[in-house]
Image (cartoon, rainbow, N blue to C red):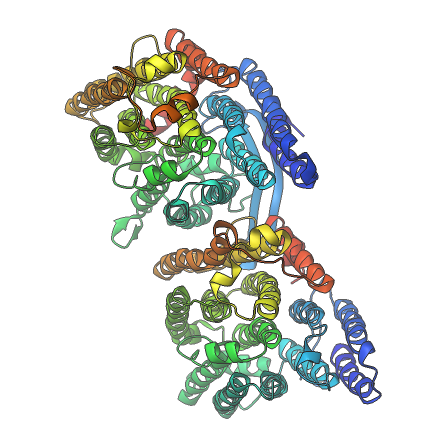
Amino acid sequence: MSLLSLLIFLPLAAGLLILVLPYAWQQRYKYVALAAVGIQVIMSAFIYLNFDGNAFSGIDAKSKYQLVEQVSWINLQLGRLGSLQIDYFLGIDGLSMPFLVLSSVVMFIAVLSSWEIKTNLKGYFALLMLLNTAIMGVFCALDFFLFYIFYELMLLPLYFLIGMWGGARREYAAIKFFLYTLFGSVFMLLVIIGLYFSVQDPITGNHTFNMLHMMNPDNYIPGSIFSALAEQQIFGIPARLLGFIVLFIAFAIKVPIVPLHTWLPDAHVEAPTPVSIILAGILLKIGGYGILRICMSIFPDAAIDSAWWLGLIGVVSIIYGALNALAQNDLKRMIAYSSVSHMGFVLLGIASITAEGISGAMLQMISHGFLSTMLFFLVGVIYNRVHSRYIHDFRGLALIMPKYTTFIMIAFFASLGLPGFSAFIAEAFSLIGAFTSESVNGLLPRWMAICGSIGILLSAAYLLWTLQRMFFGKTRLMGGEDWKSKLTDVNGREIFVLTSLTVFALLLGILPSLAFDKMNASVLELIRLVNLK
Amino acid sequence: MDVIITISLLAILVLYLGLFKAAKALLPVTLVGLLVALGLTFNHWDLANNTKSIFSGMLLFNNFSVAFSALAIISTFLILMLSKDYFERISANVAEYYTIILFALTGIIIIASYHNLSMLFIGIEIMSVSLYILTGIKKRDYASNEAALKYFLMGAFSTGFLLFGITLLYGASGSFDLTEIRNYVASSEEISPIFYAGILLSIIGLCFKAGAAPFHFWTPDVYEGAPTLITAFMSTVVKTAVFAAFLRLFYISLSSVTLQEFWVPVLVVLASLSLLIGNITAVYQQHFKRMLAYSSISHVGYLLFALIALSSASDSAVFLYAAAYTIASIIAFAALMVVQKQVGNDSFDNFNGLGRKNPLLALTLTISMLSLAGIPLTAGFIGKFMMFTGALSTYHTALTVFAVLNAIVGVFYYLRVVVAMYFKDAERNELAVPVYFKIVLVVSTLATIIIGVYPGFIADLI
């Protein structure tokens, strides 16, 4: 069993262990989970250090993936349809490796913030570990069927985590989240089946779910539904374009894009803090990762055709998310909308199909992973103490919680793109990509980059305004003296979490090459693949 | 044919046990007898799959029959395990009930192995007559009586259609034998119009039995009125048997291209209607049992996909789907029986808070609902995946998209009971789950997951 399988199934084993441990040990479950995730962090750090970004550029060649595992998994004879060949196929390249590090770190912090969970600990930690397995699996899977299984497997634990440990309207939020995501992914399944019938393994001649084979136009059976040469149509739309759109919508719901974002604020508001952290820190990235790994690589022709629309959706998300954030009273809802806005940069960067843009998008996902984790953790800190998140319930917090205010300021300034923090580099690169696109490949007009920068301005507006309203001035709290005594400053565990996240954000801001070096070759390889068309 | 003979003799043996007041021995003897029959069934499995027909071509017990018979016997076994103390509450003479269920099973095995349309008719009649009685075993219960009468009238009606269909097929081709009918289709230059009428009437007859829309209207009332144990039997084993019959008739005799042009559109309409009506009405149900009844109509719709995309892969698709559906339904009905017995009512509200008080029951029921909804890593997903793969391979894109939309609706109502169990709190006492129930729940849940993760495990059987 290699490192990737270990990384994926270690949490599952921890989850099963938690299930069999007696109830009397309830208070120790979190340590089991923490140990498992801690080992994952060490393993992912090891993978990071040993990853050679130049040699393993990945994308469409198996030999360029590191830590490859390929075992036959499901093999059903289907008579005239040949045999159903599904592999357990894992591997990492520069696009997926950074996310393994991000996921394990965010997961670690999510477990640390799970100290607040008081009820039904056995179920909670078991589900959290199952979710962890699914997330790691999604980033490692190179067989489309396997990818889909892990992708769907993420849904269930999240559904229960929101539905059982969430706030007042948790039932509504949970089912909305579930149906939204499922709506995207079941149609993805149809495209997967269509691709399966269109693609042949060049060696065995069987149909295959292997993503790498799907990226090579030579493997398409002439005349098949998704063959580029056949130019088939479904419902009057070119089949490849339709396939791209369906996959894009499936992932865009996760990202999320405007107008498919409405599940996000609801889910965030109702979810407990650790789940919000996972949602914002990892789940949204799976959308962006899917667009890069699957939509762009398998349907490059359609990606170029629809780049303008992708860019437009990105810009709309940036502006619309920011404007909505400006109007929120609930701190958590505001951060949720700011996620929509920040993830818009990812889409804008990807749509430019330039090295700067895609690198910027990748870095934006990682940076937003750390920063949104920090923001949601910070919201959790106040919410745990007084059970309110309304901005107008608080005033002058700086006087009673000075350390907390310091961290809030770091997180807010980092998020609004202050130079020196990761978000600045990431947003700058996405915008550079979008700006140069007109002269490099003519895909995106310049006004999109300009509108994108307005988004940065707006994010400064809503973050600073919130800072002013909640933290500055004389202390005045909704709950009076009672709240004042409850609002103690951050404790050791919280300081540890917040400091480590600050370090990550600063490191990536000052030395972005830590991330860029590992993924640059893969990004260039992806652009080469897309431009082959 | 040893399996059929064993089960028939077993039925008579059980009847005699009842005569000699050996009430305690009834269930063990039945279960042991079923295990013997299961062993004999597997004995017929042939790697090369070139079994010859027997009894002058009346039956053909090949791997297809082995797989479906085994599924029927195992499901019956599981359902009978739920029957401990169940019949005793209804009447003092319980031996008859076991006997009648075994007779129904005999009919089902004949259906799974017929090679002659007269045997199909005999099998369906043996099965149906037994079921009419079983539906009405709650003699003093008004709903049970109504269900029995309704089922009898509708069943007799549909058998009539089927018989008429068989007669017309015979009239055109001159034979009841499946191979002979295929030869007739292959050799004749112009197929007689009465042959087409025969196909249509057979479809109607079989769809009545399977409960496909628009021939479904008897199902909700009958499923609700019948004792839950019998409902479990009807909606799982019986449906599977009817589809085995469907598949065998269409694959062996009616699979020529010209004929497919005729009957595929008919089945596409029936499948879409079943999906639509089953799903939409299931959404509005407030009772678990009625929800299962309506959703079973939609499962018939999915099963029809295998016929629409008829190929040599259809049998494994139907088998996987039927196995997934049967196992998951057995869990659901087992949970329903526990709740009904101890709470007295099966509305969704009565499941509130079950997750806290009965973790095992809630967990197994959740996995069964996920399997019925077709969520990955459960058997139900593999079943749906096979159906969609088949339909797309024959370019039924619009139908598949429609089915996918319906699958989402399905997720919505299947999760309602999960929502009730885990997300809603209620003051309630822990429900007592008998040991037999626990065994059935755990075994079926494990099977659901094993098939979901490694479907080759049972798909290689066929």
Which image quarter is the C terminus of chain B in?
Answer: bottom right
Q: Residue furthest left?
A: A447
Q: Is residue A409 visible?
A: no
Which image quarter is the N terminus of chain B in?
Answer: bottom right
Q: Is residue A284 above or below residue B417?
A: above
Q: Can you tell which quarter of the image residue A303 is in?
A: top left
Q: Which x, y percent locates residue B446?
A: 66, 53
Q: Can you tell which quarter of the image residue B233 is in?
A: bottom right
Q: Which x, y percent locates residue A424?
A: 30, 14
**Residue at position x 72%, y 81% from top?**
B98
Residue placed most toward the observer, A186 or B284: B284
Q: Residue furthest front?
A: A481
Q: Is residue B302 above or below residue B117?
A: above
Q: Which x, y percent locates residue A244?
A: 33, 41
Q: Is residue A218 left or right of residue A229?
A: right
Q: Which x, y percent locates residue B213?
A: 41, 75
Q: Can you tell which quarter of the image residue A215 is in?
A: top left
Residue placed most toward the observer, A128 or B168: A128
Q: Is residue B377 above or below residue A469?
A: below
Q: Is residue B155 left or right of residue A21?
A: left
Residue placed most toward the observer, A298 or B428: B428
Q: Is residue B89 above or below residue A113?
A: below
